Image (cartoon, rainbow, N blue to C red):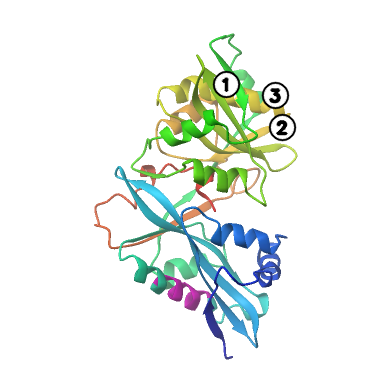
Amino acid sequence: MEFEFKKITSHEDLGRLTELMYLCFGLKVDDSYFKWKYFDNPAGQAIVYEALYNGKTVGSYGIIPEFYWIDGVVKKTYQAVEAMTHPNFQRKGLFVKLAQLVLQDSLQQNKEILMIAFPGAQSIGGFINKLNWKLINNCNYIFLPNFLFKLKNHNKSNTDFHIVKFNEANDMLLNYLEATQPHTKISKVINKEIFRWKILDNPRLKYNTIGIVNNSELIGISVYRVDYQNTCLINWLHFNDEPNYKIYTPIFLQHIFKETNIKYIYTWNSKSEPLSQAYEKCGFITNPFNLGPFHSKLPFAIYQQGFSKDNGLQIFKNYDFQPIILD
């Protein structure tokens, strides 16, 4: 088969990608989703290539730029997105060819490259075996049943704080975001521009943002979304002062259970402290079996070039590993 490969640019009609998205992932989106994701990103424009057969798009793959704190320095990184191949054209090497084109393009812009990915079942082999990516961890989910939370966490009256909801980016929230500092060696930068784009302006997912105010100061925020009838995903939990994770995380969880009336709160099983310690104290557990709720794994892989070998990028606990980093 004769395929044509070309780079996708911002001035094109992106509607041709919507059918591919549905065929590959069962997700219904319109062309505005791809414009938002690929070209409205405040970190920069995506690098995306497509494969065409007889003028029809049959595959695409790209990376979106992001900013990460790495050893206290903000660096531009990338995340792999939408590795899509039409079902009629799978196993013809399209993904690997597209990924090679994307890598060559990115290296022309920057010789020091860090990319992250959360590969699906169809693409993980290509990432690891053919493109020299490194699998860092097959990550667990952790979850907290409502009844278990009530057993481990009793209401304590405290008039020093209150919960606030952010339906828009007001000054209190924006000032907090601009003051955030990383608690781990490797942490995604979430400033006011990124937060507005990724959370508030997201065309596909609806997020809720709440904060804890103590003595008129916003001391922490939580971003979550109810994804199914009985479950709620914690996308991001952050406090500027590390001791507050253990003190105030139960307050966030108590509020979410009350507001949503769901049975389970779940999130990713981060190994970084103090987040992991706070979740453990609240009662979060893992499913040790291969069946049942929250038993699936989340592959986390990276590709690095130009970094020193002893930079810690391949050590999982060095990452602030929370769902907000997923594209």
Q: Nearer the viewer, residue 109 or 104?
A: 109
- The residue that appears at 66% across and 67% down in the rendered structure is 24
Answer whether residue 140 is visible to the viewer in this image: no
- The residue that appears at 60% across and 77% down in the rendered structure is 90
- Magenta-drawn stretch contains 100: yes
Magenta highlight range: 95-103
Q: Position of residue 12 (x, y in %)?
A: 61, 72
Decide: few, some or many residues near mark 3? Use Cα within 10 Å; few <14, some 14-19, many ≥20. few
Q: Secondary structure at mark 1?
A: helix
Answer whether residue 40 is visible to the viewer in this image: yes
Disc nearest the viewer among 2 and 1: 1
Q: Give the residue number, with chain letter if any, for mark 2.
A: 262
Question: Which mark is first along the chain, 1 or 2?
Answer: 1
Tag 2: amino acid: Ile
- As drawn, 215 above or below 323: above
Q: Position of residue 188 (x, y in %)?
A: 43, 46
Dots 3 and 2: beta carbons under 8 Å?
no
Question: Which mark is first along the chain, 1 or 3?
Answer: 1
Which numbered circle lies on residue 319?
A: none
Which numbered circle lies on residue 251?
A: 1
Q: Position of residue 96 (x, y in %)?
A: 48, 75
Which numbered circle lies on residue 258?
A: 3
- Magenta-drawn stretch contains 302: no
Separation of disc 3 and disc 1 at Cα? Answer: 11 Å
